[in-house]
């Protein structure tokens, strides 16, 4: 049972990841109905087809997939999920920063994979607004405490575009 | 020195609460060991040979007396009454209990100290020159920008899970004393046409693949340092290798791309951040710099008559002044190094009682402040010449006046096999054996300036690559052996030492060092330091002497096989 956290609460998750099974390729995999997170390769191979048959489109990015490749497509996506295969793989933080700060992506930005309590604060700061907390972890405690670990921050980032030193005088 | 304001205090207090909760959840089984490990590492907590090790940050090496007293208290209460100063401005405790660490952090927070990001694959403590602000050859005081960088690194949300650790050093002097050529980022402050800025060096590092850094930007205005570092870090975070921990440092990325392509990527990334919100306003610089103003120096004669008299009367004092005091930019003052390299203790170790004594000395003689050097010593930066004699006597009474700074026995040494799980060999007993061999002060002074650095394995925590004599612990069929390098150095002309040949057993090491020193003494011209002679005559004479009469690798192996 997926634990999707949005707006400080558990939410119902309607999105499904499209898996490419053995023997299938991005070009041949059947495109299911419904709210689907398409892998980048599928999106790139089947863009026109996906747009024609889906009103709501989601994308899933792996850590090594450069956001530059989809920078021109962002208006199509309602959700972009960024996968963290291991929580210590920090590439997704840069992916999020770029999507939000450089390419002004406005849709839902969702952290999936090895997503844990103690990373939620930083994930929020770089621009994630949805998190699928790892199975078996305490979502209620996470919602109550993990987003408010620190009351302020030094650096500029997505959630606070002004560094503290520019807000200090105010 | 810098004093916290409301936000700095709030953040470290919140950090204590955060870590307390993490320890609780780990104990309760809500966090697995694997999930907890990076969290504790980013709070300075390693698990090592005997116990956890705990690393407390001394940002850019600055401490006040109250902080040192707290360190003494923490080491006494939660550990065995001593600590170890490392080569990166940290104090390491060898035996704390994990369960106590939240309380230790709370005690540290009261005096504006912490263990934030002292280990783990994140932005580490910023290091600099131990004589910052007082050095006679200083161009710009690096401390305000070091503090601004410290705040920027603290809890940076995008760069908390880098491919590998990331170390930044900054120096503002003519002669580099911060090893800037061997850091992930080395920053050298300079003045060009009246403008203050940095030469930015990237991709240096010691460890298993020692590489001298390369200049990525010759001149960067100081206002841009944060946005430029963000560009470097973003390129590294995205493209640094994560498949192999040994190839994950930024130096490997810079080598793989070539410095020109790496620079192009950084500059392209920086084009977006340049002149953005991370540009440092003058007002912020001024606010921080106001904490680093000169103390209330008296106007004193260049030479104090009483001081000169004591020097000619007492040879031991003269020796200490010669080695352990340093030129100061203010007349009548000196900077003093308290040596943590007396014979027979682990280099860099200091007891709680000594820490308290040093805190008193700082209060009495040096405006209540002190510094830690990357050579693992303590510096009192602002002592009146007229006070040196009293200071020396008091320091001597607590074993902190060994007159050996810059000499053979002031060894840089890592914890090695006595404490460290990664070690190939012990390092502390080698340091102690060499110190014992060279315990004659006349001889030691005659040998003169020489850096001897020892690491217990190729991770190079003891900087062996940049020692004039470097000693590296290696494993040979489960036995501890030592490889020797010559000619390494730090400073502006920093370079790596060269291996002289097959390695030695622990018992051979004092003889090996002795022979190396003999070659130097036999060959030196007047006024030549060890390094000068080495540069002139090359490595061969040293090799020949050290391996004289010793079966070489192959011959020895053959002999063994026959036997
Ligand atoms: C006993 C616990 C310690 C462990 C497990 C440890 C581990 C390591 C490792 C694995 C590296 C290599 C990193 C790399 O190349 O990617 C390293 C480098 C280093 N460590 Fe340690 N270390 C320890 C203690 C110390 C101490 C006590 C000092 C200071 C005396 C120190 C200072 C350094 C320095 C200066 C490097 C520099 C090499 C570089 O990063 O380029 N470490 N350490
Ligand atoms: S150099 Fe090796 S033995 Fe020494 S402290 Fe570092 S990791 Fe341990």
Image (cartoon, helix red, strand yellow):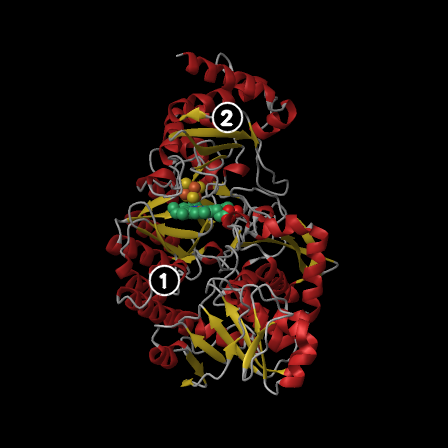
Mark 2 residue element: helix
Mark 2–mark 1 contact, CB under 8 Å?
A: no
Distance between mark 2 and mark 1 Cα atoms: 50 Å
Residue placed furthest toward the bottom:
A55
| Mark 1, residue position | B36
* Foreground pick, B4 / A157: A157
Which residue appears at 70% of the width and 77% of the height?
A72
Name the N-terminal-most of marks 2 and 1.
1
Say whether residue B204 is visible. Answer: yes
Q: Do marks 2 and 1 share a chain?
A: yes
Rendered image quadrant of residue A80: bottom right
Relative image position of residue B236 (x, y in whole percent): 59, 59
Mark 1 residue element: helix
Residue placed furthest toward the right:
B193
* Foreground pick, B205 / B401: B205
Which residue appears at 55% of the width and 42% of the height?
B209
For the C terminus of chain A, the image quarter is bottom right
Say whether residue B385 is visible. Answer: no
Left or right placement of residue A140 versus residue B61 in this view = left
| Mark 2, residue position | B447
Relative image position of residue B146 (x, y in whole percent): 54, 60
Dividing the image into four equal quarters, which quarter contains ligand 2? top left
Rendered image quadrant of residue B486: top right
Q: Which mark is residue B419?
A: none
């Amino acid at each position: 049972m997926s634990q999707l956290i949005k707006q400080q609460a558990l939410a119902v998750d309607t999105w499904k990841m499209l898996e490419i099974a053995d023997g299938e390729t991005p070009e041949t995999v059947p495109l299911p109905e419904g709210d689907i997170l398409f892998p980048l390769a599928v999106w790139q191979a089947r863009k026109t087809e996906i747009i024609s048959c889906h009103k709501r489109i989601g994308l899933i990015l792996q850590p090594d997939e450069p956001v530059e490749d989809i920078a021109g497509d962002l208006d199509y996506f309602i959700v972009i999920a960024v996968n963290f295969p291991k929580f210590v793989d920090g590439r997704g933080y840069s992916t999020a920063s770029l999507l939000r700060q450089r390419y002004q992506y406005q849709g839902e930005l969702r952290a999936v994979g090895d997503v844990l309590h103690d990373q939620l604060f930083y994930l929020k700061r770089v621009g994630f607004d949805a998190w699928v907390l790892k199975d078996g972890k305490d979502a209620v405690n996470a919602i109550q405490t993990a987003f408010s670990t620190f009351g302020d921050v030094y650096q500029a980032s997505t959630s606070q575009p002004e560094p503290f030193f520019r807000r200090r005088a105010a | 020195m810098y004093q916290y304001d409301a936000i700095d205090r709030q953040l470290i207090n919140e950090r204590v609460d955060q870590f307390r909760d993490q320890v609780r959840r780990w104990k309760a089984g809500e966090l697995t060991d694997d999930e907890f490990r990076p969290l504790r590492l980013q709070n300075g907590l390693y698990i090592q040979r005997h116990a956890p090790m705990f690393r407390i940050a001394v940002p850019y090496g600055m401490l006040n007396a109250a902080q040192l007293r707290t360190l003494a208290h923490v080491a006494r209460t939660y550990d065995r009454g001593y600590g170890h100063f490392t080569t990166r401005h940290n104090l390491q405790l060898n035996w704390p209990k994990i369960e106590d660490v939240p309380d230790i952090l709370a005690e540290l927070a009261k005096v504006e100290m912490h263990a934030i990001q002292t280990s783990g694959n994140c932005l580490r403590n910023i290091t600099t020159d131990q004589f910052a602000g007082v050095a006679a050859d200083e161009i710009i005081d690096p401390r305000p920008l070091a503090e601004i960088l410290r705040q920027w690194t603290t809890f940076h949300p995008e760069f908390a899970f880098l491919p590998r650790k990331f170390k930044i050093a900054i120096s503002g002097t003519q002669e580099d004393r911060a090893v800037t050529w061997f850091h992930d980022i080395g920053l050298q402050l300079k003045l060009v046409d009246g403008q203050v800025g940095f030469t930015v060096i990237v991709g240096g590092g010691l460890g298993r693949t020692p590489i001298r850094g390369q200049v990525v930007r010759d001149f960067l205005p100081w206002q841009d340092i944060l946005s430029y570092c963000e560009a470097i870090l973003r390129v590294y975070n995205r493209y640094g290798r994560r498949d192999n921990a040994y190839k994950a440092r930024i130096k490997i990325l810079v080598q793989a791309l070539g410095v020109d392509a790496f620079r192009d990527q950084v500059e392209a990334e920086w084009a977006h951040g340049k002149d953005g919100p991370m540009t440092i306003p003058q007002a912020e610089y001024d606010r921080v710099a106001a904490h680093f103003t000169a103390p209330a120096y008296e106007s004193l004669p260049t030479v104090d008559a009483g001081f000169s008299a004591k020097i000619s009367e007492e040879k031991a004092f003269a020796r200490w002044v010669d080695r352990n005091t340093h030129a100061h930019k203010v007349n009548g003052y000196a900077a003093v190094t308290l040596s943590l390299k007396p014979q027979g203790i682990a280099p860099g170790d200091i007891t709680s009682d000594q820490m308290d004594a040093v805190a008193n000395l700082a209060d009495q003689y040096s405006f209540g402040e002190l510094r830690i050097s990357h050579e693992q010593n303590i510096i009192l930066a602002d002592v009146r010449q007229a006070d040196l004699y009293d200071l020396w006597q008091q320091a001597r009474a607590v074993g902190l006046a060994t007159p050996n700074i810059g000499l053979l026995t002031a060894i840089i040494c890592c914890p090695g096999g006595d404490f460290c799980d990664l070690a190939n060999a012990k390092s502390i007993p080698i340091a102690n054996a060499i110190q014992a061999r060279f315990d004659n002060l006349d001889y030691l002074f005659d040998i003169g300036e020489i850096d001897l650095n020892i690491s217990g394995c190729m991770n190079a925590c003891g900087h062996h690559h940049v020692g004039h004599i470097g000693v590296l612990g290696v494993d040979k069929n489960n036995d501890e052996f030592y490889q020797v390098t010559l000619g390494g150095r730090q400073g502006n002309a920093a370079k790596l030492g060269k291996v002289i040949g097959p390695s030695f057993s622990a018992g051979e090491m004092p003889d090996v060092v002795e022979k190396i020193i003999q070659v130097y003494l036999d060959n030196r011209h007047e006024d030549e330091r060890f390094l000068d002679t080495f540069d002139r005559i090359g490595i061969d004479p040293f090799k020949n002497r050290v391996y004289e009469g010793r079966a070489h690798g192959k011959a020895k192996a053959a002999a063994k096989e026959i036997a």
